[in-house]
Image (cartoon, grey):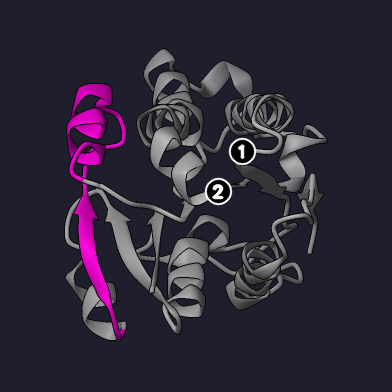
């Protein structure tokens, strides 16, 4: 059975992906605290509990993983508010969770992914292409994540696959209170499944379900 590490697996898109891939993967369920609920709901899973704002903790926890086939960075923060209202601490936390945590995990687990000729998927957003009012920190972090993913894809071509998912508004805690039409998180999970199950010779630059 292949192994997949999914950050943000306790809720939202991350949980939907864990449930989708959990049908035939052993899941390392990434969460900042208690991952027991999603772990108990899956056929084969264990917690990967770590503070994604702490690079040293990420490195130490990742060092416990010997083999990995799939790494999905689905954890994310959305500091809502106009630029003048967002504090320096909120800016830094958005980049720590949305960008740097995924980079740190990829750095630590790249040898394992290379050995398995595995796949890295970053869960991005339409905000990785287009800015919008009230989302300066979020949009900036997603633009940065897209740049990292696309450059890494070129550097690692032939060794691992790198794909970026850019869903639009999705029905998660992050969009609570937004009454506009939203896709279910399961739709994003199906897009992740498409990328994971593709043949080794097939690579998606980005998917926008």
Instruction: Give the CA distance from mark 1 to mark 2.
Output: 6 Å
Where is residue 39 drawn, in percent x and y?
A: 24, 74
Are the residues flagged by discs 1 and 2 in contact, CB closer than 8 Å?
Answer: yes
**Most foreground residue, 144 or 59:** 59
Disc nearer the start of the sequence (1/2): 2
Which image quarter is the N terminus in? bottom left
Kindly tell me whether residue 76 is visible in this rendering. Answer: no
Which residue is at 61% across, 20% downward? Answer: 83
Q: Quadrant of residue 88?
A: top left
Is the C terminus in the top left, top right, bottom left or bottom right quadrant? bottom right
Place of residue 126 in the rendered image (x, y in percent of width and height, measured from the top left): 76, 46
Per the rendering, the mark at residue 180 is none
- Tell me the element at label 1: loop
Q: Is residue 4 left or right of residue 144?
A: left
Image location of residue 38, percent across then percent down: 29, 74
Residue at x 65% of width, y 45% of height? 161
124 w.r.t. 95: above or below: below
Relative to residue 61, is residue 187 drawn left or right? right
- List the residue tagged with mark 1: 159
Closest to the observer, 148 or 154: 154
| Residue 86: image location, x then y, percent | 50, 22
Secondary element under disc 2, as helix, strand or loop, is loop
| Residue identifier under label 2 | 117
Q: How many marks?
A: 2
Q: Which residues are magenta?
A: 43-64
Q: Does the segment drawn in magenta span residue 158?
A: no
Above/below status of 187 relative to 49: below
**Circle 2 Cα neighbour tier, 10 Å, few/some/many (<14 / 14–19 / ≥20):** some
Query: Can residue 180 be seen from the camera position used here?
Result: yes
Where is residue 96, by image quadrant? top left
Within-10-Å neighbours for mark 1: few <14, some 14–19, many 20+: some
Magenta stretch contains residue 55: yes
């Amino acid at each position: 059975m292949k192994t997949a590490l999914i950050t943000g697996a306790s809720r939202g898109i991350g949980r939907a992906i864990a449930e989708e891939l959990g049908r035939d993967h052993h899941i390392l369920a990434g969460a900042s605290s208690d991952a027991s609920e999603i772990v108990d709901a899956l056929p084969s899973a264990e917690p990967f509990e770590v503070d994604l704002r702490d690079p040293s903790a990420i490195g130490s926890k990742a060092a416990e993983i010997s083999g990995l086939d799939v790494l999905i960075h689905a954890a994310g923060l959305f500091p809502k508010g106009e630029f003048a209202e967002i504090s320096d601490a909120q800016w830094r936390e958005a980049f720590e969770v949305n960008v740097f945590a995924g980079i740190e995990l990829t750095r630590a687990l790249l040898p394992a992914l290379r050995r398995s000729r595995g796949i890295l998927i970053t869960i991005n957003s339409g905000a990785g292409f287009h800015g919008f009012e009230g989302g300066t920190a979020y949009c900036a972090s997603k633009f940065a994540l897209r740049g990292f993913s696309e450059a890494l894809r070129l550097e690692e071509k032939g060794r691992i696959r790198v794909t970026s998912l850019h869903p639009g508004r999705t029905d998660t805690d992050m969009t609570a209170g937004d009454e506009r039409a939203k896709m279910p998180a399961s739709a994003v999970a199906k897009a992740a499944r498409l990328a994971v199950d593709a043949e080794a010779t097939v690579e998606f630059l980005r998917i926008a379900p």
